[in-house]
Amino acid sequence: MLLSVAFGAHAYAQVKTPADTSQEGMIRKQEKPVDTRADLSKQYDFGDMLNDILRPKRKADSTRKRSAITVVPNIAANPTIGFQIGIKAVAGKVLGNVPHTYMSTAATSASITTKGILYFYFLHNIFTPGNKWNLQGSIVASKSVTPDFGLGIGQASNKSPEDYILTNPERKPYVWHSEYYKFFEKVYKEIGHNLFLGAGVEFEMRRHLNNPKYDSILTPFEIYNERYGFPQDHYVASGFLFNVQYTTRDNPNRAYKGVYIDGGFRVNQTWVGSSKNSLQFTYDFRKYFSLSARTPEHVIAFWSWGSGVVAGAVPYLELPGTTRDPSFRSGRGYTGGYFKSTQFFYSETEYRFPITRNKLFSGVTFVNIESANDKSGTRLFEVWQPAAGLGLRVLFNKATRTNLCLDYAWGRYGTKGFFLNLNETF
C-alpha cells in the first residue's frame, strides 16, 4: 500500500501535472455561471471555518471577495521516494468580462525528498478578454525516479523470453533514476462559439537514466530501446502539436455540467532535436450531468481518454498509459505508468454528491477501466484492467469551487492507494 499526499496517482514521484492544473484540461467558465452570490453565501468552506476559529466574533461580510489563490503543503511518503515536503499553489481569475471570458488558471509547486528527489513545475492556461486567444503551457524540471511495470496490460506473452520480460505479466516493479525536463506551449484561437483551433511545441528530455540494481538483469526498458533504436541512458522527444478543442464546462475546477472534447496530433521530428520521428494521436472526452437543479452538486461525470502511436517510435517512458493523460490523474488504484503501450484506452465514471447542507463536505464513488496492446499479440480492447474507489471532498475555496480531495482506490495485482489532491480528477 502506498501513501501519497498532493501527488495523486504518481506514488513513485514521477509526478507531473495534477488535475487542478491540467494544461490541456483546465476548464473554462460557463456563459451563465451556476454559482450566484446568494448561492455562495449559503456555502461554507475551509476559509470560513478558519475565520470562525481564529475570529469567532467577526461578522460575515458578503461583499468581501474571496482570494482565488489556494496554497497547500505538498507532502508524500513511500519507500521509493522517502519522505517529501514541498508547497503547491493554484489560482484562478477571469481576465475579461463575465460571461464573455473563460477563467484563466495557473499553478506552481516545488518539493524535495529525503532520497534527493527534486521536483518543480509552473503551469498556465490563460484566456485573453473575449476568449480571442488561449495560451496553455508548462515548465517542468526534476531529479526523479520513474516506476516501470512493463509494456502492455499485464497479459503474458509466450512468443520469446524477451517478450515475456517486456510484457511483465507479474507486474514486477523496476525503478529508473533520471533528470527530466519539459517545456510545453500551445496557442489556441477561437474560431467559433466554444470551438478552438490550436498549435504549439513540446520538448521532453531525460538524462542520466540509470539504476545499478538492474545492471545484470534484462529489463523491459532495455528490450524496448534495443528494438526501437533508442539510447539506454537518455532521449529527447520534441515536436509540434496540432489540436481542436470544444468546451462548454461551467467551472475550471469542479464542473456541474457541460462537455469537454480535445483531439489532435503530436509530431516529433529529429530535425528539431527528437531522438526519433513519430506521429501520435490523442483524444480527451469529458461529460458532466447535474442531477438536480436545486442541488447541482449531484453530478454524474464520464471521462474517456485514449492515445496511439500512428507512425514512428515514442520513447518508452513517454508512451501513453496510466496517468499519461493531460491531468496525470487517470488510473486511481494503480501507480503511474502501471500499464502503457503504443495504443492505450482509458474510461472512468464518477458520481459526486454533497454530504452536508452547507457544502463543506461532499463525496465521490468511481470506477475505471484500462486497455492496451502489448506488441506481442494482445490487441487494444482485448484485455481490460479495472479499478474502483471512493473519496471525501472538503470545500477549500467556494469562490473557485476548489476542493481538497481524499481518495482511496483498489486495482488488480493487489494494488491500492490513498490519494490526496486539489480539485477533481477530471
Image (cartoon, helix red, strand yellow):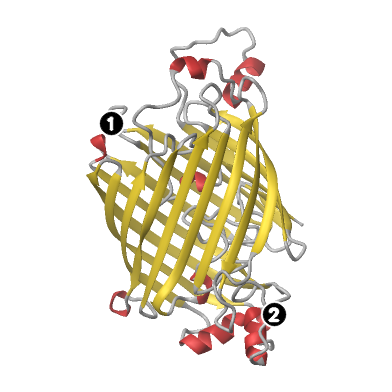
State which tag comes first along the sequence, 2 or 1: 1
Reading the image, the residue beneath label 1 is 100
Residue located 50% across and 67% down the image: 320
Amino acid at pointer 2:
Lys
At a point 54% along the width and 43% down the height, the residue shown is 301
Residue 38 against residue 387 in the figure, above or below: above
Q: Secondary structure at mark 2?
A: helix
Q: Is residue 7 left or right of residue 29?
A: right
The label number, if any, that marks residue 213 in the structure image: 2
Crowd class of label 2 (few under 14; some 14 to 19; many from 20; radius 10 Å): few
> How much space separates mark 2 and mark 1, taking CA atoms?
56 Å
Give the label, 2 or 1, closer to the camera: 1
Residue 113 in the figure: left or right of residue 134: right
Neighbours of disc 1 within 10 Å: few (<14), some (14-19), many (20+): some
Q: Is residue 393 above or below residue 197?
A: above
Q: Residue at x 58, y 84 (%)?
A: 376
Residue 212 in the image: state x and y as whole percent: 66, 81
The amino acid beneath tag 1 is: His
For the N terminus, give its image quadrant: bottom right
Q: Nearer the viewer, residue 83 or 236?
A: 236
Question: Is residue 191 among the parts visible in the rendering?
Answer: yes
Is residue 361 placed above or below 327 in the rendered structure?
above
User: Which secondary structure, mark 1?
Assistant: loop
Q: Nearer the viewer, residue 177 or 90?
A: 90
